[in-house]
Image: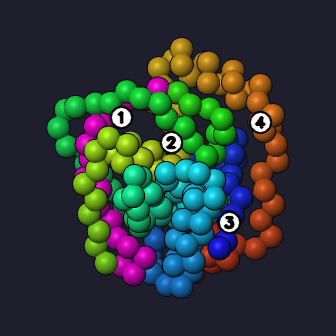
Amino acid sequence: MTVVPVRLFGDPILRSRADEVVDFDRELRNLVADLGDTMHEQGGVGLAAPQIGVALRVFAYDVHGTSGHLVNPKFEVIGDDEQLGPEGCLSIPELRADCLRAMRVVARGFDMHGEPVTIDGDGLLARCIQHEIDHLDGVLFLDRLDPAARREAMRQIRSSDWFGAEPPVVKANPYGLHGTGR
């Protein structure tokens, strides 16, 4: 089991768009394993590669027994139904806030071997897919809160014990130069 430190709010990688995966190799399989191990150890339902310091478009998920990963994911909203409910993030510890999301989405991407994958998700799985793909685009769930909720969330973050902590030191990126496998 390889558990990797989760990057916290304020780390610039969380605000950058991740790169497309071009090499479906051993490094990618190791990344997927690290995402799953870290997500489970931290008690999350999803974890995107930028959250562990790797700027690649990959995320892992485990929602009510439905688990897996997506590489280079895209999603489309199905229907007009929305859900307003509590959302949290491993990169913003101890904070939860009601966030509006689509109720149902279909996500498409690839597995770690380059095989096509489609996930039809509703409820929490749809929320997870949208949240993790947001991470890959440098968007945090805080950005989706209404102004009053965002102000309150920022107040809580500024008063937290972890805010302002130095990001974890990464001595070597095991996933290749700049996380691209090249």
**Type of secondary structure dominating the magenta stretch:** strand
List x then y, in percent, for residue 176.
63, 78
Q: Seen from this angle, which residue lies furthest left?
A: 79
* Residue for badge 1: 101
Kindly report which numbered mark, 4 or 3, lies closer to the viewer in this rendering. Answer: 3
Q: Could you say which disc has been placed on residue 3 in the image? A: 3
Mark 3 neighbour class, 10 Å CA radius: few under 14, some 14 to 19, many 20 or more: some
In depth, the one of 147 and 152 nearer the eye is 152
Q: Seen from this angle, which residue lies furthest top?
A: 148
Whole-number angstrom distance, CA of label 4 to CA of label 1: 26 Å
The boundaries of the magenta stretch are 98-114
Asked if one can make out residue 44 in the rendered structure from this viewpoint, the answer is yes
Q: Is residue 180 left or right of residue 118?
A: right
Residue at 37% across, 27% down? 84
Residue at 59% across, 66% down? 37
Residue 79 lies, with reference to residue 159, above or below; the image says below
Whole-number angstrom distance, CA of label 1 to CA of label 3: 29 Å
Check disc 4 and report its element: helix, strand or loop. loop
**Is residue 107 a member of the stretch shown in magenta?**
yes
* Residue for badge 4: 163
Whole-number angstrom distance, CA of label 4 to CA of label 3: 21 Å
Whole-number angstrom distance, CA of label 4 to CA of label 2: 18 Å
In the rendered structure, are the residues bearing label 2 and label 1 in contact, judged by CB atoms less than 8 Å apart?
no
Residue 138 lies, with reference to residue 144, above or below; the image says below
Kind of residue sitting beneath label 2: Val
* Residue for badge 2: 139
